[in-house]
Structure formats: C-alpha cells, structure tokens
Amino acid sequence: MNQAPWHLESFVLCTETIFLCTDLNIHVDVEDNPDAESCLDLMDSFARAQHVHFATDIQGHTLDLVITEKWTVSFKMH
C-alpha cells in the first residue's frame, strides 16, 4: 500500500476519465481486513469508487477491481 497514494495522486491531477482495472490481491470484500479498510478509505479520500462487488477468485473473494472517479460512471457489473 505504500505506493498507492502516489498513484492515486497522479490520477487526481489527470483531466481525462480513467478506468483503473487491477488485481490488487487484497480481499476488499472482507470488512475486518485492515488492508482492505485502508485501501477503500484511501480510494474514498481521493474521491474514487470501486465497482466490483462480487467474487473474482476461486476462494470467493473480490480481488479484481475497477476503480473510477466517484462521479464518472454508474454501471452494474456482472
């Protein structure tokens, strides 16, 4: 997570719409996971939203993420 703030700062300065698709290897669906909580809080502080809310790995967790500005898009992922 040490490099994440620098990358998010770069996105904040960008004037284009950005879709960040990544395999973060953090179980963002686990509420009591401190890494997930930090990651989601960090995205929120940079006005970013994570759009994948279903399992993306064989163990039933969400690892693959699509991140955008909160106000950029509204879509349902299947």
Image (cartoon, rainbow, N blue to C red):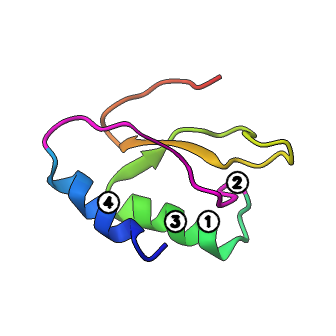
Contact between labelled residues 3 and 1, with CB atoms less than 8 Å apart: yes
Q: Which residues are magenta?
A: 15-29
Q: Is residue 16 left or right of residue 74?
A: left
Query: Looking at this view, is 64 or 77 the one in front?
Result: 64
Q: Which residue is mark 2?
A: 29
Mark 2 Cα shell of 10 Å, populated few (<14), some (14-19), many (≥20)? some
Could you tell me how far apart the alpha carbons at marks 3 and 2 are, in whole angstroms?
Answer: 11 Å
Which labelled disc corresponds to residue 36?
1
Contact between labelled residues 2 and 1, with CB atoms less than 8 Å apart: yes
Q: Residue at 15% across / 54% down in the picture?
A: 13
Percent coordinates x, y for residue 60 in the rendering: 83, 45
- Badge 3 amino acid: Cys
Q: Which residue is mark 3?
A: 39
- Badge 2 amino acid: Asp
The mark that comes first in sequence, 2 or 4, is 4
Percent coordinates x, y for residue 31 in the rendering: 71, 64
Percent coordinates x, y for residue 51 in the rendering: 53, 38
Q: Which residue is mark 4?
A: 8
Task: State the SS at label 3.
Answer: helix
Which labelled disc corresponds to residue 2?
none
